[in-house]
Amino acid sequence: MEKITIIGAGNVGAHAAVSAATLELGNVVLLDKNGDLAKGKALDITQSMALIQSDVIVTGTDDYKDTADSSVVIITAGVSRKPGMSRDDLLLINAGILESVVRQAIEYSPNCILIVVTNPINTMVQLAYDISGFSKERVIGMAGILDGGRFKYFIAQELNIGSSEVVTMVLGDHGALMVPLEDHCQVNGQPIAELLPRERIEAIVKRVQHAGSEIVNLLKTGSSYFAPGLAVIQMAKSILRDDHKTMPCAVYLEGEYGVDGAFVGVPVVLGRNGVEKIIEIHLSDKESAAFKISVEHIRERTEDLNNKRNIKA
C-alpha cells in the first residue's frame, strides 16, 4: 500500500489525513513536532475508518524515520493567519519552518513528490524546490484548486444552482492578486457573462480573491482548513492513482505564459511522476495584465524572502 506523509497535524493537516484515508489512497503518516497531538489525531482518524469498513492506518509521530519511503509528502506545517494578517506576513516565520521540514523529509523519502500548502504558497514552494534539489516536476504548490472551488461556490450561490454545474479556473498567486478567469467561467457550457451582470461578476471575483481573509476574520483564531485539506488531497489522488487530471497548481515555469523562473499557479496535468504537462490557455488582455501583476508580486515576495534570509544568515 502507498505511504503518504502529511507534515503538520494542525487543522489543515488533520483534515488532509481524513480525506486521504477516506479515499483509501494509502496508509498515512501524520507528523508534528507535538508527537502526542499527531498520535491522538491519527488514532481518532484510524478508529473512524473502522466505521466505514476501511483498513487504512493513520500513524501519528514526531520522528521523521516513520515517514521513510513515502510516495507523496504534503507540507502543511507553519503558522496560520490571524485577523488583519496577510499571507505575506507569514513569510520569514514559515520559511524557517519549511526549510527544516524539507531537509528532514527528503532525507527519508528521496524519491517522493513534495506538495506544499504552507503560506505564502508560491514563495514557500520555491523555497522547497531550492532546498530539495528535486526536479521541477516533483515540487508542487497547492493553489488554484482551492481558489477555483471557492469561485465555483460563489457563482453557484449567486445563480441558485449546484456547484457541480460550474467550471472555473484561477491562476497566478494564491493571495489577493490571484486571477479568477472570468472568460473561462462557464455554467453548463454557457459563459458566465451571459448569465450575470458585469458588476455581480466583479463582486464575486473580488470575494474569491479575499475568500481566505473572510474566513480568517470570522474564525478569529485561525484560517480555513476543511477546503484546503480536501484540495491538496485531490492533487495527491491524481498523482497516486495516475489519473492525469488537469488542475491549477503552483509549478515552476520556464517560458510558459511568458514567465521564466518562478512558481506560478497555472493548469497542469498531474500523474504518477508529478507534473506531467503544463497547459497553456488563452488569456484575454484583461486577464493577461492581471496575471503579469500577480507574477510580479510573486517575484517581489520571493526576492524579499531571499534578502531576509541572507541578512539573517
Image (tube, helix red, strand yellow):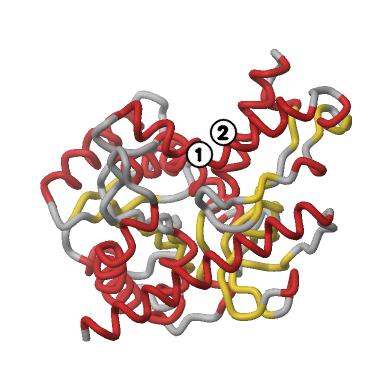
* Residue at 62% from the left image edge and 26% from the top image edge: 154
Which label is found at residue 210? 1
* Residue at 21% from the left image edge and 50% from the top image edge: 60
Residue 111 on image: x %, y %:
45, 76
Q: Is residue 310 above or below residue 213?
A: below
Along the line of sight, which residue is nearer the eye, 6 or 280? 280
Along the line of sight, which residue is nearer the eye, 182 or 33? 182
Work out whether residue 274 can be spotted.
no
Discs 2, 1 touching: Cβ within 8 Å: yes
Left or right? Give the position of 272 relative to 133. Answer: right
Q: Quadrant of residue 155?
A: top right
Along the line of sight, which residue is nearer the eye, 13 or 251? 251
Give me the C-alpha separation between circle 2 and circle 1: 5 Å
Residue 117 on image: x %, y %:
42, 55
Residue 174 on image: x %, y %:
52, 53
Left or right? Give the position of 265 relative to 284. Answer: left
Which label is found at residue 207? 2
Instruction: Give, as a three-letter code, the residue at label 1.
Output: His
Q: Quadrant of residue 133?
A: bottom left
Report the quarter where the N terminus lies.
bottom left
